[in-house]
Amino acid sequence: GYDDGAGVSAMFRAPGDVAVDAAGNIIVADTGNHCIRKVTPQGLVTTLAGTAGQHGYDDGAGVSAMFRAPGDVAVDAAGNIIVADTGNHCIRKVTPQGLVTTLAGTAGQHGYDDGAG
């Protein structure tokens, strides 16, 4: 299921990895819903990036961006969320302002090759 909200009223679908940011928020790779979510220390769940229930590939702002089965997340010192967008075979970044960009890899192309971006 999918639902933003407080505590147990929120719903996830096959959540994957989690990370904690400097403010104590839990960042969740909601793998089955194809989005990145945040759980505040008070238990409020919101969607930061991705279109819930719809998979695809698109950089952009917040919920207009698209992921395909994001599996892992990490938070860097600047507060950026780094996402292993597993289904798209690339590494993405979500800025504190909610802008999603691709750091490395090409959506839909898997394999092995060193290089820039």
Image (cartoon, rainbow, N blue to C red):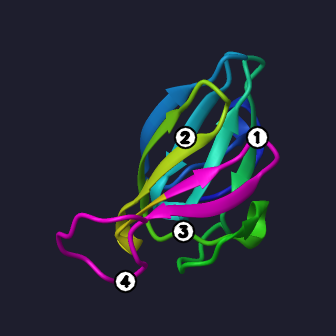
| Camera-side residue of 113 and 17 | 113
Q: What amino acid does circle 1 point to?
A: Pro
Q: What amino acid does circle 4 point to?
A: Gly
Of pointers 2 and 3, the one earlier in the residue sequence: 2
* Of the two numbered discs 2 and 3 in the rendering, the one whose residue sits closer to the viewer: 3
Q: What amino acid does circle 2 point to?
A: Val
Q: Looking at the rendered structure, which numbered label has been put on residue 67?
A: 3
Q: Which residue is mark 2?
A: 28
Q: CA distance from mark 3 to mark 1?
A: 17 Å
Q: What amino acid does circle 3 point to?
A: Phe
Image location of residue 98, percent across then percent down: 77, 51
Q: Give the crowd class for mark 3: few <14, some 14-19, many >=20 residues within 10 Å.
A: many
User: SS class of the residue under badge 3?
Assistant: loop
Q: Which residue is mark 1?
A: 96
Of pointers 1 and 2, the one earlier in the residue sequence: 2
Q: Looking at the rendered structure, which numbered label has been put on residue 108?
A: 4
Of pointers 4 and 2, the one earlier in the residue sequence: 2
Q: CA distance from mark 4 to mark 2?
A: 23 Å
User: SS class of the residue under badge 4?
Assistant: loop
Image location of residue 108, percent across then percent down: 37, 83
